[in-house]
Image (cartoon, grey):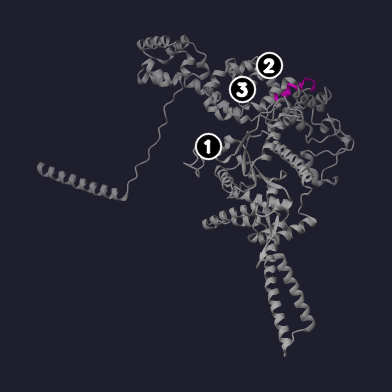
C-alpha cells in the first residue's frame, strides 16, 4: 500500500530519508546499503529532488517571515561579497542559528574514476574542492584564501551579522579610504607643485609628500601582494594543488600532503560558514560516494579513513552518503593488510563510521513495473521502415567478400567507398539474409518483440522479475536479440513471445541452476546414444525441466560446495522451481537454446567437468562408479557390486552382512564420512583401497618429488674431511689384511 502523494514505495523511503537529512545535525555519515545493481543512483537522484523541494519550501517561508531575500554570488551581490570578505568579519548571530532554510550543495564522487590513483581518498578531497568552487564561483573563494587568515568568524558576540576589521583601532575600510585619499592628495600636490626645495615651505611640502608616499607605498605593496595571491588562486585552483602533491612519492611529502588536505577541509568549512552568513541561509554539503565497492581493498580502506578523519570536524557542514554493497566493503576491510588486527570485524568497523544506516528495500511489484516500463520506453533502438525483408528501392548493399576483393579495381563506387550494385542484378536472397520462406509467414518482428514486452507486465510475471535494475535491462535487451535471431532460423508462427520472455528471465536470473539442468539433459542424451549406437532416440521432449532438475537434485546437493561462487549468481531458488515447473520442457530447450545469447557457457562447462561427463570412458576403464549411479543404488545393489571387487568369500560375506545391518545404500555412502565407513566395515588396507576407489572415487595422493637437501659450505667441508678419513682407514685396513695374509 503506497501512501497518498507517492507513486511507489521507493518514493516513500526516499522522502523519509530526505526529511531526516534536512533536520539532521552535521556532520553525519549515511550508510546507503544495497547489493549491486539495486538502483542506488536512481534513489540518490530522488533524494536530491526531495531535498531541493524541501529547501525551496523553507526558503519561501523564511523570506515571508523575515522580509530578507537570500543573496547570490553574481552581479551586485558578488561585489558586496568581495567587499565584505576584505573588510569585515562574519558573525553567527542567534537569529542566524534559528533560520530553517537550508541550501544543499550536492557533490557526487565516483570512486571508480580515481581507482588508478595511489591515493584514492585524495580524489575525494579534490572532488570536494572542485564542487565548492563550481557552486560558489572561483572569485569569492580565491579572495577568501588570500585574506582568510585575517578573517575571524565570531559566534553570537554582536547583534549585526558583519563587523568591520580593525587597523590601529580604526575600521579597515575607513583606514583604506584614508590611504586612498592621502594617495590622491599627494599625487595632486606632486602634479601641481612638483618637488619644492630651498625654503621652509618647500621643506614642509617635501616632508608631507614623503610621508604620504610612504603610507601609500606600504599600503599599495600589501594590496599588490593580496592581488597576486588572488590571481594565483584563480589560475592554479586548490584542486590542481592537491593533484600536484598527490604525484609525489617520498614519505615526507606524503605526510605534509595529509596535513595540507586537513587544512584545506578546514578552509572549506570556514568558507561555508561565512557564505551561510552572507546568503542568509544554512548550507549543507551532501557528498555522495558511489562505486567504491568496485575498487581495490586497500583503496577502499583509504576512502573510509578519509571519511572518518577529514570529514569528522564537529563544525563541518558535511552530509556523507556512502552508497555501497556492505558485504563487499566488509570483506575488503577484513582482508585488508592495512587494518590487520584493528578491524578484524568489518561490520564493527563500518558501525564506527556510519551515523545513519539506511538499507534500500526490495522493489515492490509497482516499482518493478515502473522501472521496467521506463527501460522499455527509453530503448535506443532506431526506428526503421525496413522490416521483415522489405527494402527501399534506392538501397546500397554492403559488398560481400568477393566484391571487397574487386572493389579497388572498380570505378563504380559510392561516396563511402562501397560498390553500387544494381538491384536488377541481385536476387532476393542477396538483399535479405533471412530465408524468404520464413520471412513471408507470421507476424512482424516488431510485433513479436512488443508482445514479449507486454507479457512482462502480466500479473503472473511480477514475481519472476528481479529488483536488480541491471538484470531488468539485460532482460529487455536479450529479448530483442533472441527474437531477431529466431526469425532467421524458424518460421515466425512457431515463435511464442511469452515463452521467450520466460526463458530469457530464467537465463538471466538463474544461470547456475539452468546450466546444471542443461548439462543433465546433454549427459542423458549422450548416455542413451552410447547405450544404443545408431539410435536417434534422445530424452523425452515432453519432460518438464523441473523433472530433470528434481532427478539430479541430490547430486547437485552433494557437490554444491564446489559451486558456491556460481550458486551466488542465482536468484530465489523457490521462484526458480516455480518458473521451471510450470512453463518449460525439454523441447523448449532444443528450440530456444540455439538463439540464446545471454547464457555464459563457461558455467555450463564447469558443470560438465564436475559431473564427469567428459571422463565417461575413463570412469569405465578404471572400473569406478559415478556419483549419479551410486546415489540411486539400494542396499542390495551395493552388495551385488561388492562381488566385482575380488574379495575373499569370507570377507565378502562379512562385508555384505555389515552393509545390510547398517543400511548402507548408495546415498548413505555418498553423504557419510570415509573414515566412518572404514571403521564400520572393518576393512584391511588392501580391501579398503579397492572399496574406496570403486565406490567413493578415492584416488591415491600424487607422489610429490622431494628435492635434494641443501648442504651449506661448512657442512660440505666436514663431509669431505670425514670421507677422506674413511678412505684412509679403508686403505689401512686393506694393507693390514694383506700383511696378515702374507
Magenta highlight: main SS:
helix
User: Is residue 348 at least partly visible in the picture?
Assistant: yes
First along the sequence among labels 1 and 3:
1
Outermost residue, bottom side: 198
Q: Which residue is mark 3?
A: 573
Q: Which residue is mark 2?
A: 582
Residue at the spot x=72%, y=67% of the render? Answer: 174
Q: In this rendering, would 639 be left or right of 281?
A: left
Q: Position of residue 471 (x, y in %)?
A: 68, 31
In the figure, 71 relative to 379: above or below? Answer: below
| The magenta segment | 492-504
Q: Position of residue 427 (x, y in %)?
A: 85, 31
Q: Position of residue 276 (x, y in %)?
A: 70, 50
In the figure, 649 relative to 720: above or below? Answer: above
Disc 3 and disc 2 in contact, CB within 8 angstroms: no
Q: Quadrant of residue 568?
A: top right
Q: Position of residue 468 (x, y in %)?
A: 67, 31
CA distance for labels 2 and 1: 45 Å
Residue at the spot x=69%, y=65% of the render? Answer: 172
Magenta stretch: residue 400 in it? no
Q: Which mark is residue 348?
A: 1
Q: Nearer the viewer, residue 480 or 167?
A: 167
- SS of the residue at dot 1? helix
Amino acid at each position: 500500500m503506497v501512501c497518498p502523494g507517492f507513486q511507489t514505495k521507493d518514493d516513500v523511503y526516499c522522502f523519509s530519508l530526505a526529511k531526516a537529512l534536512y533536520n539532521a545535525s552535521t556532520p553525519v555519515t549515511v550508510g546507503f546499503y544495497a547489493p549491486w545493481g539495486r538502483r542506488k543512483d536512481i534513489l540518490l537522484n530522488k533524494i536530491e529532488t526531495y531535498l531541493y523541494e524541501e529547501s525551496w519550501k523553507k526558503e519561501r517561508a523564511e523570506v515571508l517571515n523575515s522580509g530578507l531575500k537570500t543573496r547570490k554570488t553574481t552581479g551586485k551581490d558578488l561585489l558586496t561579497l568581495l567587499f565584505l570578505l576584505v573588510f569585515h568579519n562574519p558573525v553567527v548571530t542567534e537569529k542566524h542559528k534559528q533560520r530553517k532554510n537550508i541550501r544543499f550543495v550536492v557533490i557526487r564522487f565516483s570512486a571508480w574514476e580515481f581507482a588508478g590513483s595511489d591515493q584514492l581518498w585524495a580524489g575525494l578531497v579534490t572532488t570536494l574542492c572542485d564542487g565548492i568552487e563550481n557552486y560558489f564561483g572561483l572569485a569569492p573563494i580565491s579572495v577568501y584564501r588570500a585574506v582568510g587568515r585575517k578573517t575571524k568568524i565570531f559566534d553570537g558576540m554582536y547583534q549585526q551579522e558583519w563587523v568591520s576589521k580593525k587597523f590601529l583601532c580604526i575600521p579597515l575600510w575607513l583606514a583604506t579610504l584614508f590611504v586612498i585619499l592621502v594617495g590622491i592628495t599627494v599625487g595632486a600636490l606632486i602634479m601641481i607643485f612638483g618637488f619644492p626645495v630651498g625654503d621652509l615651505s618647500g621643506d614642509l611640502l617635501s616632508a608631507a609628500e614623503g610621508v604620504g608616499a610612504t603610507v601609500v607605498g606600504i599600503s599599495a605593496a600589501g594590496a599588490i601582494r593580496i592581488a597576486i595571491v588572488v590571481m594565483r588562486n584563480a589560475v592554479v585552483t586548490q584542486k590542481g594543488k592537491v593533484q600536484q602533491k598527490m604525484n609525489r612519492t617520498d614519505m615526507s611529502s606524503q605526510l605534509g600532503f595529509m596535513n595540507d588536505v586537513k587544512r584545506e577541509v578546514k578552509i572549506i568549512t570556514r568558507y561555508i560558514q561565512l557564505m551561510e552568513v552572507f546568503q542568509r541561509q544554512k548550507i549543507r554539503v551532501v557528498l555522495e560516494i558511489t562505486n567504491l565497492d568496485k575498487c581495490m581493498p586497500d583503496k577502499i580502506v583509504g576512502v573510509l579513513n578519509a571519511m572518518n578523519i577529514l570529514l569528522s570536524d564537529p563544525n563541518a557542514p558535511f552530509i556523507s552518503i556512502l552508497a555501497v554493497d556492505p558485504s563487499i566493503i566488509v570483506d575488503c576491510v577484513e582482508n585488508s593488510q592495512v587494518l590487520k588486527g584493528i578491524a578484524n570485524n568489518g561490520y564493527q568497523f563500518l558501525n564506527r563510521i556510519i551515523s545513519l544506516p539506511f538499507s534500500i528495500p526490495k522493489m515492490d511489484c509497482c516499482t518493478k513495473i515502473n522501472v521496467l516500463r521506463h527501460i522499455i520506453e527509453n530503448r535506443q533502438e532506431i526506428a526503421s521502415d525496413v522490416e521483415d525483408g522489405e527494402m527501399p528501392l534506392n538501397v546500397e548493399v554492403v559488398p560481400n567478400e568477393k566484391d571487397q576483393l574487386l572493389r579497388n579495381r572498380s570505378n563504380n563506387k559510392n561516396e563511402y567507398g562501397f560498390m553500387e550494385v544494381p538491384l536488377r542484378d541481385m536476387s532476393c536472397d542477396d538483399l535479405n539474409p533471412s530465408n524468404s520462406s520464413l520471412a513471408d509467414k507470421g507476424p512482424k518482428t516488431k510485433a513479436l518483440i512488443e508482445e514479449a514486452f507486454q507479457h512482462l507486465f502480466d500479473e503472473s510475471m511480477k514475481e519472476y522479475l528481479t529488483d536488480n535494475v541491471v538484470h531488468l535491462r539485460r532482460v529487455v535487451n536479450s529479448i530483442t536479440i533472441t527474437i531477431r535471431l529466431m526469425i532467421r532460423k524458424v518460421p515466425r508462427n512457431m515463435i511464442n513471445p511469452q515463452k521467450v520472455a520466460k526463458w530469457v528471465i530464467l537465463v538471466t536470473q538463474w544461470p547456475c541452476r539452468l546450466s546444471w539442468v542443461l548439462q543433465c539433459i546433454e549427459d542423458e542424451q549422450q548416455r542413451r546414444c552410447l547405450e544404443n549406437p545408431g539410435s536417434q532416440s534422445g530424452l523425452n521432449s515432453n519432460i518438464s525441466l523441473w523433472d530433470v532438475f528434481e532427478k539430479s537434485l541430490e547430486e547437485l546437493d552433494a557437490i554444491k560446495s564446489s559451486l558456491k561462487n556460481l550458486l551466488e549468481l542465482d536468484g530465489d531458488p523457490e521462484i526458480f522451481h516455480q518458473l521451471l515447473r510450470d512453463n518449460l520442457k525439454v523441447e523448449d530447450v532444443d528450440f530456444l537454446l540455439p538463439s540464446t545469447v545471454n547464457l555464459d557457457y563457461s558455467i555450463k562447462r564447469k558443470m560438465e567437468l564436475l559431473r564427469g561427463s567428459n571422463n565417461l570412458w575413463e570412469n569405465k576403464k578404471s572400473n569406478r562408479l559415478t556419483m549419479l549411479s551410486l546415489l540411486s543404488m539400494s542396499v542390495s545393489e551395493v552388495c551385488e557390486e561388492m562381488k566385482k571387487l575380488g574379495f575373499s568369500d569370507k570377507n565378502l560375506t562379512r562385508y555384505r552382512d555389515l552393509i545390510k545391518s547398517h543400511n548402507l545404500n548408495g546415498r548413505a555412502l555418498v553423504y557419510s564420512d570415509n573414515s566412518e565407513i572404514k571403521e564400520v566395515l572393518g576393512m584391511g588396507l588392501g580391501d579398503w583401497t579397492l572399496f574406496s576407489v570403486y565406490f567413493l572415487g578415492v584416488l591415491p595422493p600424487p607422489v610429490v618429488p622431494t628435492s635434494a637437501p641443501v648442504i651449506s659450505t661448512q657442512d660440505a667441508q666436514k663431509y669431505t674431511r670425514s670421507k677422506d678419513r674413511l678412505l684412509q682407514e679403508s686403505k689401512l685396513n686393506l694393507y693390514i689384511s694383506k700383511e696378515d695374509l702374507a
